[in-house]
Image: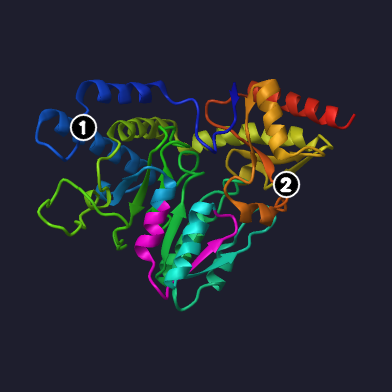
Amino acid sequence: MIYLDNAATSYPKPRGMVAAMEECILKYCGNPGRSGHSMSMKTGEEVYHARKKICRLFGIENPERLVFTKNTTEALNMGLKGVLKPGNHVITTSMEHNSVLRPLKALEKKGVSHSILRADREGFIKASDIEKAIRPGTRMIAVTAASNVTGTKMPLSEIGETARKRGIIFLVDGAQAAGSMEINVDKMNIDLLAFPGHKGLLGPLGTGGLYIGENTELAHIMEGGTGTDSKSRIQPCELPEGYEAGTINAPAIIGMGYSAEFVEKIGPEVIGKYEEELISWLDERLDEMDFVKRYGPPACRKTGISLFNVDGISAEEVTGILSSRYGIAVRGGFHCAGLAHKTIGTWDEGAVRVSAGPFNTRREMEKLVDAIAEIGSRQNL
């Protein structure tokens, strides 16, 4: 299988990550923070090391400000529902994933309003447009670092400057950018950063995290055991334990820590540039096919994603043919981001998404181009 669905989850994973998880499971996998014996303490130490490795990647100085979650969706729900109160207003964009748009819709019932700024046809939002949308009650700006549909990169630094200047919380959805472009919470004035472990960080499924800025107060959206202050029925506020109720997935977190260090050593910018080169070449070949319509910005302004449709055949069917006949994995449809498709003009049909990763090759892209050429040629006979 030629795997080109890295925007859903990355594949393959670094071999060392699997070894790190296996070592934990086989040799010392106690419940961290719940016991004083050596296995529990060893697991706790390794989880802490993983926390520090991930913090280095995002420029987070205090590891206690990083809370582990099972995915970006959980992290975004924590950030949105833990901060926003009745009367608050949120500014977001039409390129957001449902993990932002659906919680905001649910929060309407609690008196939280929001404005959705429509991006241009390539998925871009200007920081100046966000500033114009600020109201007296605006509490938060919630923006994706890069669209999961088009790959369009957002101007995080400029938006962060606007948010800091106006005293507004800046929440960033890093799902499609973490690991392939620079994200520095200090330089970009990010107050809340939600990210997955299983995509650009090359970690295992079921991992993610939320960075909570030093000046950001977050209410709990879940209570339970923390291993601390067990006599009290009040959930502890201490970070990170107070926000990681229940037993954490220690082997997967340790694996994520290994992979984050792996990505840091290569460099997210290096990975991003490599993926850009692959996608740039692919986009050029697709643009030469008169039966292909491509969407989104040039490769230099997006992450490693190419989005397109083949005339006369649905996105889902193209995806199925690529898988069954050619052994190529991509994703067709609406990618959990309906408003993004409405913005770029694919509301009715969806689109085929190709997403490259650091382990993909030019030869694999050539085979994809050959397959699409055959599919389009047969369709137009």
Closest to the observer, 25 or 153: 25
Residue 71, quarter of the rendered image: top left
Query: Residue 234: percent from the left, percent from the top?
Result: 18, 59
Residue that numbered label 1 is attached to? 43
Q: Which mark's residue is nearer the viewer, 1 or 2?
A: 2
Q: Is residue 335 left or right of residue 208?
A: right
The residue sitting at 35% across, 51% down in the picture is 211
Helix, strand or loop at label 1? It is helix
Query: Residue 29: percent from the left, percent from the top?
Result: 22, 28
Residue that numbered label 2 is attached to? 349
Q: Is residue 269 left or right of residue 243?
A: right
- Asked if residue 229 is positioned above or below residue 272 in the image, the reply reads below
Badge count: 2
Closest to the observer, 261 or 224: 224
Query: Residue 39: percent from the left, percent from the top?
Result: 15, 28
On residue 221, the disc is: none
- For the record, the magenta segment spans 76-96
Query: Residue 357: percent from the left, percent from the top?
Result: 54, 31
- Asked if residue 105 is positioned above or below residue 350 in the image, the reply reads below
Helix, strand or loop at label 2? It is loop
In space, the residues marked 1 and 2 are separated at their CA atoms by 48 Å
Q: Residue furthest right?
A: 381
